[in-house]
Image: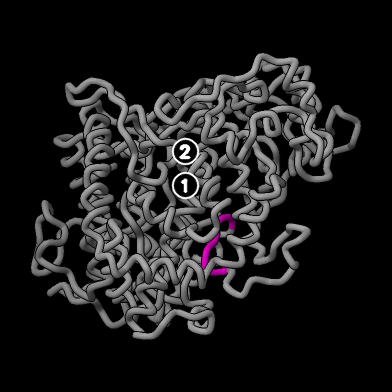
Amino acid sequence: MKSLMSLWRVMAEESAMICRTSADLDFKKVEVRVKSEGLSFLTITLPAFAKDFEQALDAGSVESDHFVGFSRRGGLPLFLGGFLSQVFDSDGALLENPSVDCIRAVRQLCMLFGKVEFPCSNTRIDSAIAGYLETEQELARAETSIPEELLPQFQRAARVLWADAFQCVDQSVYEGTLIPKHGPGATADKLRGNSKFNQREWTRRLEAYFPYGEFCFPDGNEALPSWSFYYQQQPPVLAEPGTERPVKVITVPKTLKTPRIIAVEPTCMQYAQQAISQRLVEVLEKGTCPHPHGGGHVFGNSGFVGFEMQEVNRLMAFEGSVNRSLATLDLSEASDRVLNRHVELLFSGFPHLNGAIQACRSLKADVPAHQGKSRKVITLRKFASMGSALCFPVEALVFTTIVFTAIAHELNVPLTREVVNSFRGKVRVYGDDIIIPVDYVQSVIRYLEAFGLKVNSDKSFWNGKFRESCGGDFYDGEWVTPLRVRRDIPRSLTDVQEVVSLFSFRNQCYWAGYWMTAKFIDEKWLIPLTRGDYNIVDVTAAGLGRESVFPYRQQGLSAKGDHTPVVRGLRVRYPIPASPLDGPGALLKFFLKQGEEPSHDEKHLERQGRPLVSGIKRGWVRAY
């Protein structure tokens, strides 16, 4: 904790210097509060202070319910008063020309440790699991309380927006041209690495759209599967809907306040989900149908959702912060609040696509014991949680459809392609980050909540000049995104992830202009850790080093004989676990490979999967 405190103090001093104020009293207040409240003051209380600060910027003044727990003088809290007084007047009203440097400084100092991946207490983990179950109960109520007249409107909006794209994927499902894929992560049946290519667990529902003999054995010809391999193996037991393996609900570190909840899918479900997800995302991102019988035309309504490029959302958030024409909305528990009923309605009219999506959707979840309650399996009303390969793209489609349903209602006109196209560049959804015109905010919020979703008011902005979306935070066109410490300070090179994170944070500080902070990190931690093997490297260097505007100083040439300049530094090693694969599984992996480039790893049939261990070695690293 002392390490985090010292880092906060240096960054506060540098921020104060930039803003021509003092942070001495602020640090004393932090010392007192940390002594009485512990680490939670840095990781929970200060981020809450930042949320109140953002809401005050959006509202145009500091309200009485802002900054609770902090002493005030007049309308402003004493804490960080030197910065806040350059943003608000003494009564708490927003200044006509507030200091953007001070806005950036307040957010930086309050959010510095807001995302540190500390493990939560058992009490907070239990609370998160209880919240997961409570959300399911709320969905049950939402499923019956939604006004029935909204459903046809939603269905019409879906047809207008996505009919071309859905028709393309629907045809691919019908003709069996989807290509499945195994993800790199954990699965509910505990298959790892190459063992996934020898999966023997399948379901009756999957068999209707993804026949086991066609999708789990080598196929050198799309029209003629290698059924001989199927007959050589013991046939799988096709699980009936009532006996299917449920998703496994787990928690992973997110912040000290709350863990992240993930539902780990069975291998067979993830495998089929990837097949649909890849084609769906490809069609929606490119706006064209890659299917040979798809016509090759460009879809008129592409561009309203994003799955791979966050930059579009950031640019629109920048625009909204300047002219205040666009609002940024954020949803709470977005993935866990999408009702499967609405997903079925979204894809209605495309029976093959709809059926395939439902076939690879897990019906139940295995929820761990919590708060004295035993482990239990529940039936899911949500479409899917984080962990499903279809969760992210489908939720974005649902949110976008609801947005246009609300817009059509506000305009009091039927939704047509012409109406939709008039909002090009004004509506964009990436995951649960939603950008819409300010004029439609209230209507969109009402519709989102009517469909059982929850708008996060703390992270939604439309009144002032502050906007945030997809990791880009802006005030009046200025970048005010804070730098964040992601892990605790390392004690030795054996703390591999902490070392990598500290190098990354140091270099981010340097390029953001926090040179005093970067120098402090160098002298306090990185130089002692590296024992002098700490040299300037280019941003593209493979090893860990010190990034700088100054050029690297070559210390030698690569031993590989390619005359590549090298310097002394740290190399991170992530040994891939052994996972030998041969026979039909190896041939299946070959035929499932996509793209024309050869495999980047010549030993992929010997080793595969996410590294279970990692290590750091000193040595020569490429300088660029």
Q: Is residue 180 above or below residue 578?
A: below
Magenta part of the chain = 303-308
- Could you tell me the amino acid type at mark 2? Gly
Camera-side residue of 193 and 556: 193
Q: Is residue 305 magenta?
A: yes
The quadrant in which residue 621 appears is top right
Quadrant in which the N terminus is drawn? top left
Q: Quickly name the residue at label 2.
A: 387
Q: Position of residue 273 (x, y in %)?
A: 56, 41
Camera-side residue of 447 and 517: 447
Q: Residue furthest right?
A: 561
Question: Magenta stretch: dominant SS?
Answer: loop
Q: Is residue 571 above or below residue 27?
A: above
Image point (79%, 26%), residue name: 587
* Circle number at residue 391: 1
Q: Is residue 438 magenta?
A: no
Circle 1: element type:
helix
Label 2 near label 1: C-beta < 8 Å?
A: yes
The quadrant in which residue 53 appears is bottom left
Circle 2: element type:
loop
